[in-house]
Image (spheres, grey):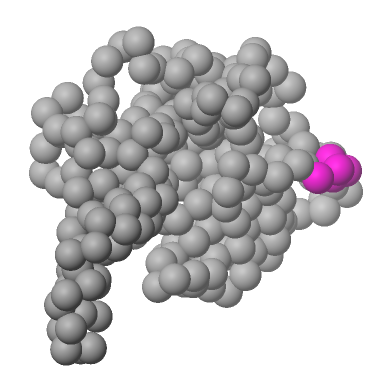
């Protein structure tokens, strides 16, 4: 799902919580957030040595307008897309052979039309000429899609990570998904695996999500368990958020602050 856009929500008071990792500097990325829990895509190789991803600088995306620099990005390499197509082709061909064996008739495998259908379904399942680039900065995440022949321009969508208003976890097709929206009304729906293509993307995404949850973002139980939020201070801080009238004394370590309007 490329993204949704709803009406912006009313602004809310945003608090700094010393118990959570701080927001990194938008230009330097320091201090970088600690490793987030739940990461399951560690290949044990550096990004520049991963054959499944593109490292060409020409593929590096631009950040959203008036927002900080790109700190991490991921795009599948051509080799990875070809591999995906071949895997899909093998599955479809294996399925056709299995059906023939179950029917006790291998003769229809000699019809070229059968293999055209196999090729078409393998193409549709793997979409080998489609490229999605995921990039992330200090407080934003963005998706860019290559332009197809019937489109006037390439699609793009981004969200502000520290201003998420709704987070929903759910299962679909045996895969874990996250659906989330920000205060500007932008939304996205992603498999968790897509957010874990790069450890740095997951860490930056998770840190912004922690602050959003602590500041009152709506979240369902599936997402809480999926993201292991009960193991962090975020849920407790969310339930202990002070009212604006409670702020003012120097003894209170939590100060209200709106996110920088430039982000």
Name the side, left or right, on which 236 lies relative to 6.
Answer: left
Q: Return the residue nearer the eye: 88 or 77.
A: 88
Residue 186, image x, y percentages: 71, 40
Residue 9 among magenta residues? yes
Q: Is residue 23 visible?
A: no
Residue at point 17%, 25% (across, down): 48
Q: Residue at x 40, y 73 (%)?
A: 174
Q: From the top left corner, tell me how far across and down residue 76 is, in percent.
A: 30, 34
- Residue 42 location (% of width, % of height): 20, 48
Tell me if I can see residue 149 in this picture.
yes
Give the residue displayed 14% in from the left and 33% down from the top.
51
Residue 83 is covered by the magenta coloring: no
Q: Name above or below for residue 97 compared with residue 91.
A: below
- Does residue 174 appear left or right of residue 5 in this picture? left
At x 46%, y 47%, the residue is 206
Q: Magenta part of the protein: which range?
A: 6-10
Is 161 situated left or right of 246 in this image? Answer: left
Q: Is residue 88 above or below residue 129?
A: below
Magenta segment, prevailing SS (helix, strand or loop):
loop
| Residue 169: x %, y % from top left | 55, 65
Q: Nearer the viewer, residue 146 or 26?
A: 146
Q: Name the quadrant of the C terminus.
A: top right
């Amino acid at each position: 799902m490329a993204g949704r856009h709803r009406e912006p929500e009313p602004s809310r008071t945003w608090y700094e919580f010393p118990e959570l990792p701080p927001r990194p500097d938008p230009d330097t990325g320091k201090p970088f957030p600690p490793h987030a829990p739940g990461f399951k895509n560690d290949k044990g190789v550096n990004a520049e040595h991963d054959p499944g991803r593109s490292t060409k600088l020409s593929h590096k995306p631009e950040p959203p307008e008036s927002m900080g620099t790109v700190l991490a990005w991921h795009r599948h390499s051509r080799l990875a897309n070809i591999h995906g197509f071949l895997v899909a082709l093998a599955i479809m061909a294996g399925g056709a052979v299995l059906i023939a064996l179950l029917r006790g008739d291998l003769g229809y495998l000699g019809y070229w039309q059968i293999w055209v259908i196999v090729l078409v379904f393998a193409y549709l399942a793997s979409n080998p000429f489609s490229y999605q680039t995921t990039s992330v900065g200090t407080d934003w995440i963005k998706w860019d899609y290559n332009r197809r022949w019937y489109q006037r321009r390439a699609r793009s969508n981004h969200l502000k990570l520290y201003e998420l208003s709704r987070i929903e976890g759910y299962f679909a097709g045996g895969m874990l998904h996250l659906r989330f929206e920000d205060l500007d009304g932008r939304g996205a729906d992603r498999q968790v695996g897509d957010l874990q293509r790069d450890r740095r993307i997951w860490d930056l995404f998770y840190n912004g999500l922690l602050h959003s949850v602590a500041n009152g973002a709506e979240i369902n139980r599936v997402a809480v368990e999926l993201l292991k939020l009960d193991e962090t201070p975020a849920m407790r801080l969310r339930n202990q958020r002070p009212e604006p009238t409670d702020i003012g004394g120097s003894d209170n370590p939590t100060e209200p602050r709106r996110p920088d309007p430039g982000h």
